[in-house]
């Protein structure tokens, strides 16, 4: 098994995967910034210095660094070329593109019939103020691109909200607003690894955000059949065989899907559950390389006859 990890050599995840591997597995770490590609008569070749990624059995995306529009588009194109060449890429480029875009993820979840907070995306401060009012005057403002709770703000005062909107618009940002869902101070992080789903409950008495990186504590969460099915549906909506799914149990008695992460971490979850997640990721990569089915068909939402009829 030859694996290329797109990430930083000193990453905890790289070391964890190396630990979980065996002597028969070859692991190389390459940075996104050193990817190059060539179009030859024999096909498209993607490399990083002297490492030819076309020769790998699998490529694992462990980071998604910032870059210019041209750099980001090229990186996704390069991953797409590897998929076309038969290399198992986890996660596939389209899954990364969908998951990294919170608005697009929200759209996919809604179309699949998965409950998600009411969301509005604006480009003008006045439109955002109107959206703030329509969403009940209590919203969560998020960057469209980003993770780990960075840049997320709760706004429940219209004057403050207007000033924040005006500042962000002046910086060229879009305004992604979600209705705040009253809850009991915790959420669920479910990790999808192929057909397996692991779960933890995250609580943070000092902050309404429940990211472990922000001081939240984690405890094991029993993954019921309903939770497993919902997590797999969310991962399937994005197209990610490896995904972190954030679910919020609201006081309204419903589970709300907040986000789907296509470059999920598992450090806190692995420690909390005493589970070797890295070994599970290796199995997933082997399954992908062998072309084995990862997500059972029974978790998919039923087909829409009207949509198929329209296409015909």
Image: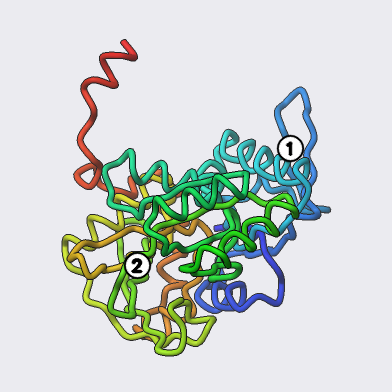
Within the image, what quadrant is residue 184 found in? bottom left
Label 2 belongs to which residue? 190
Residue drawn at the location 29% of the way across and 82% of the way down: 220
Q: Is residue 100 left or right of residue 279?
A: right
* Nearer-the-camera pick, 26 or 222: 222
Residue drawn at the location 33% of the way across and 80% of the way down: 185
Q: Is residue 41 left or right of residue 302?
A: right
Q: Position of residue 66 (x, y in %)?
A: 72, 57
Q: Is residue 98 left or right of residue 2?
A: left
Label 1 belongs to which residue? 45
Q: Quadrant of the N terminus?
A: bottom right
Q: Secondary structure at mark 1?
A: strand
Query: Which residue is outermost to the top?
Result: 312
Q: Residues within 10 Å of mark 2 (few under 14, many from 20)?
A: many
Task: Compute the Cα span from label 1 to label 2.
Answer: 36 Å
Residue 93 versus residue 145 in the image, above or below = above
* Nearer-the-camera pick, 55 or 194: 194
- Asked if residue 41 can be seen in this view, the reply is yes
Q: Position of residue 282 (x, y in %)?
A: 47, 64
* Nearer-the-camera pick, 16 or 3: 16
Q: Position of residue 215 (x, y in %)?
A: 50, 87
């Amino acid at each position: 098994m030859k694996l290329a990890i797109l990430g930083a050599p000193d990453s905890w995840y790289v070391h964890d995967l190396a630990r979980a591997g065996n002597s028969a597995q070859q692991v190389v770490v390459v940075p996104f910034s050193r990817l190059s590609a060539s179009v030859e008569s024999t096909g498209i070749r993607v490399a990083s210095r002297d490492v030819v990624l076309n020769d790998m059995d699998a490529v694992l995306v462990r980071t998604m660094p910032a870059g210019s529009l041209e750099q980001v588009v090229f990186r996704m194109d390069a991953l797409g070329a590897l998929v076309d060449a038969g290399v198992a890429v986890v996660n596939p480029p389209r899954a990364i593109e969908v998951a990294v875009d919170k608005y697009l993820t929200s759209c996919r979840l809604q179309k699949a019939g998965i409950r998600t907070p009411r969301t509005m995306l604006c480009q003008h401060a006045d439109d955002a103020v109107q959206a703030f009012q329509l969403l009940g005057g209590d919203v969560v403002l998020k960057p469209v691109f980003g993770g780990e709770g960075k840049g997320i703000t709760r706004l429940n005062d219209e004057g403050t909200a207007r000033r924040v909107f005006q500042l962000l618009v002046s910086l060229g940002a879009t305004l992604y607003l979600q209705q705040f869902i009253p809850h009991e101070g915790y959420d669920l992080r479910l990790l999808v690894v192929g057909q397996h789903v692991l779960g933890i409950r995250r609580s943070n008495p000092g902050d309404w955000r429940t990211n472990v990186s922000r001081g939240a504590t984690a405890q094991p969460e029993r993954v019921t059949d309903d939770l497993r099915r919902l997590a797999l549906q969310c991962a399937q909506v994005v197209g990610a065989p490896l995904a972190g799914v954030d679910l919020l149990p609201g006081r309204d008695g419903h589970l709300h899907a907040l986000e789907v992460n296509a470059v999920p971490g598992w450090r806190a979850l692995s420690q909390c559950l005493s589970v070797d997640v890295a070994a599970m990721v290796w199995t997933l990569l082997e399954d992908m390389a062998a072309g084995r089915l990862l997500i059972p068909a029974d978790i998919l939402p039923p087909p829409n006859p009207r949509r198929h009829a329209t296409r015909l």
